[in-house]
Amino acid sequence: MPQAAICIKNLTKVFSGDLGKKPVKAVDALSLDVVPGEVFAFLGANGAGKTTTIKCMMRLLFATRGTVGLFGISNQSPDAMKSVGFMPEQPQFYGYLTGREFLYFIARLYKMKKNEQKIRIETCLDRVGLTGRADQRIKGYSRGMMQRLGLAQALIDDPKLLILDEPMSNLDPIGRKEFRDLILSLKEQGKTLFFSSHILSDAEIIADRVGILNHGKLINTGKLKDLIQSQTTSIDVTFVLAQEKLKKLNLDQSQIVRQDEKNLVQLQSEKEVQTLIENIIRLKGNVVSVIPQKRNLEDIFMTEIGG
Ligand SMILES: Nc1ncnc2c1ncn2[C@@H]1O[C@H](COP(=O)(O)OP(=O)(O)OP(=O)(O)O)[C@@H](O)[C@H]1O
Ligand SMILES: [Mg+2]
């Protein structure tokens, strides 16, 4: 088993209730491993605790309990942060700088050498599609452009791991498609990506695994393929068979929906489907289609969080 890129154990964050307010348990005993090279989507409704978890991972908040390891190093050690690029939720910038100036400022914070700064900045600008606008002041940027600049700064030190809080929330459909392609190209380079999102269709396309957070608790994690497969609701079989032979199919006749000369039945198991197909063929009928009715991530999400 490879060393986890992210290893969260029993993470809990309670915000103490100031001025008579009740304490809020924003993250509740969360444990999670992300393997290197994986794209992990951290999903949850507003207020589920995504940002709080990410802030604890980045040490922007002190966890009440629990530990976070990044490539085997505790996040309490400054060394752990060297492998991480981070983009906060709705990043804010100093508007009088241009995009390129801002990235130089960040590169200097990383103490990069001059020639390395230039190469990294141009590469990152190109990656996020901001090269043509890099000399414009940030205050004239759209929200989507700011989001791209936020991603460029996260990429500046060529980190092994990217932690992104709602990276797609301000992007239009074209921007989201470009962003998805960018994530996939980063994955191809072997990067590990952990991002929070409430845009389920985007997560469905790019994530290897998802975790669903509800009221601070991780209520499900898994490979999307498995989650979706485990939630197959029924299998629709459409077939052609002379009406008088339908009775010989060993089916509850009220289950059969007949339209023109086609018949449709919804079955629950592959075994039932197998038996039905054998019977149809034996009775010299034709199977037109066998379609598993799978649920999408949105259905799974709604069921899990009880929405
Ligand atoms: N500094 C704080 N003090 C008190 N409560 C807080 C604080 N920050 C967050 N919370 C509460 O913790 C809970 C989780 O908030 P968090 O911002 O982590 O959710 P989120 O999943 O990121 O939501 P969103 O999708 O809206 O970004 C919420 O109930 C929120 O009100
Ligand atoms: Mg948030």
Image (cartoon, rainbow, N blue to C red):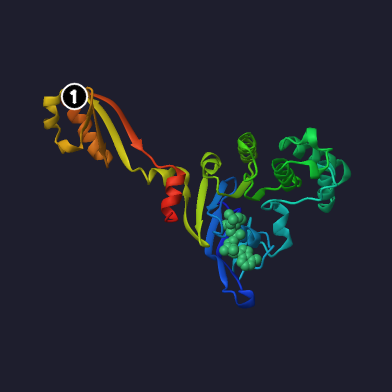
Q: Amino acid at mark 1?
A: Leu
Residue 72, relative to residue 160: is it above or below? below
Q: How many marks on residues? A: 1
Q: Residue at x 73, y 59 (%)?
A: 79
- The quadrant of the picture occupied by the C terminus is bottom left
Q: Position of residue 124 (x, y in %)?
A: 75, 39
Q: Position of residue 72 (x, y in %)?
A: 63, 58
Q: Position of residue 122 (x, y in %)?
A: 80, 37
Residue 82, relative to residue 143: is it above or below? below
Q: Residue at x 27, y 41 (%)?
A: 269
Q: Is residue 53 visible?
A: no
Is 73 left or right of 97, judged from the image as shown? left
- Work out whether residue 306 or residue 233 is closer to the camera in this orientation and state it: 306
Q: Taking the image as four quarters, which one is ligand 1 found in?
A: bottom right
Is 100 left or right of 144, judged from the image as shown? right
Q: Position of residue 5 (x, y in %)?
A: 61, 53
Which residue appears farthest toward the right when viewing the image?
114
- Work out whether residue 88 or residue 286 is closer to the camera in this orientation and state it: 88
Which residue appears farthest toward the bottom when viewing the image?
20
* Residue 17 image-quadrant placement: bottom right
- Work out whether residue 253 or residue 79 is closer to the camera in this orientation and state it: 253
Residue 90, relative to residue 133: is it above or below? below
Is 93 left or right of 239, judged from the image as shown? right
Q: Which residue is mark 1?
A: 241
* Residue 20 image-quadrant placement: bottom right
Q: Residues within 10 Å of mark 1 (few under 14, many from 20)?
A: some
Residue 208, relative to residue 51: is it above or below? above
Q: Residue at x 76, y 38 (%)?
A: 125
The residue tagged with tag 1: helix, strand or loop? loop
